[in-house]
Image (spheres, rainbow, N blue to C red):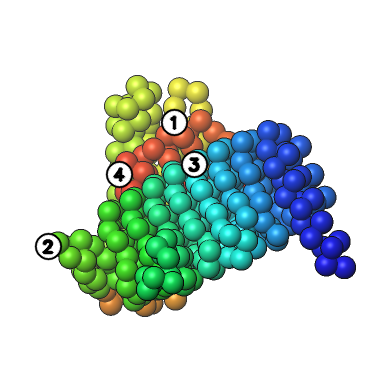
Amino acid sequence: MIFVKRNFKSFKKLLAMATFLLPSFLRIPILKFAGFKIGKNATISPFTVIVADEVEIGNDVYISPFVLIFNLKRVKFGNKVYISLGTFIHSHGVGSLELGDFSATGLFCLINCTCDVSIGKYTCLGPRVMLVTHGSFLPKNLGFSTQYFSVKIGNYVWIMMDVKIVPGVNIGDYVIAHPGTVIMTDIPSNSVYTHERNSFRTYPMSTLYRKKVDEEYINRWRSSLFSDLASVIRDYFGLQTECIKQEGYWAVNTPKEAIKIWDKDIIRDFSDAKVDGHDIILVIKDSDLDAMQRFRNTNWLDINLNLYNKARHSALFDYLIFYFALKYGILFTLYER
């Protein structure tokens, strides 16, 4: 029985490596046949190798080219995980890696999984982040110490570029680590970790916030929304656009199309409103109510901004994406329904 199990694992590894040149739509059925659990709309790019005893990949996962995930005991990616080009994840066959929903790695990350690594949801490792779970090279029999400890990173964590994480570190939820820092101790939740005066320190997340976000602020923000949309599109793209605020919607006119952007919080019953098949529905909501309540007293409000379209993708969406990112620092997702 052990002989059969070992040979099946070897067959899976051989198949995973043999298909690394194939496009995703040909490769995924073969990997599923080999026992990989892969969700819907997942992409495993060519020139990427995934070798592990157990592989579970969620829906809408994207794994870029030139990614090496090698010799792990178990790999589990949640939904909408993004693995960037050049990411190198390796082990000695005993460690595992788990990434939560909406997590991502930046360019050329290195993750050592000699021991287990757990990364929560909405957590991003920036470019060239290095995470290790062992720290030994010199011979132990001569008295040199060895370190083999797992690493755990919580939810809503942003590890910026060139950060180094050593074995045994536990990072809580809602944490930001500044570029170039070396994380050698645990970081509590709701904290910012930075380099200051030749040392590293942790201070509360609330010190980052400068504006009081309340209902008055949101209403004021909504009233001025799209006020300069026409000028931004004209200045950056040379396209003459007209944006007029009406009762419950904004009328946006370009030389090629005219659409309406409806505010869902103002027009609650869309059956009575004349919503055309090409119109957009603007939804402003709290993406995490628990987080909002937790940070309400520290001037924090997590606003999730999505645009819903009932029919087809419009060229205007590209301009709206640019507009929100430029003016508000907000990225939104287009959902079709």
Mark 2 surroundings within 10 Å by alpha-carbon count, few (fewer than 14), some (14 through 19), many (20 or more): few
Circle 1 — which element?
Answer: strand
Residue in the image at 38% along x and 77% along y: 293
Distance from disc 3 to disc 4, alpha carbons, whole Å, reads 31 Å
| Sooner in the amino-acid sequence: mark 2 or mark 1 | 2
Residue 327 is tagged as: 4
| Sooner in the amino-acid sequence: mark 3 or mark 2 | 3
Distance from disc 2 to disc 4, alpha carbons, whole Å, reads 34 Å
| Sooner in the amino-acid sequence: mark 2 or mark 4 | 2
Distance from disc 4 to disc 1, alpha carbons, whole Å, reads 20 Å
Residues 38 and 150: in front is 150
- Tell me the amino acid under the disc marked 2: Arg
Residues 171 and 224: in front is 171
Instruction: Point out residue 32 in the picture as x, y percentages from the top left corner.
Output: 78, 51
What quarter of the picture does the N terminus occupy? bottom right
- Residue indicated by mark 2: 197
- Tell me the amino acid under the disc marked 3: Gly
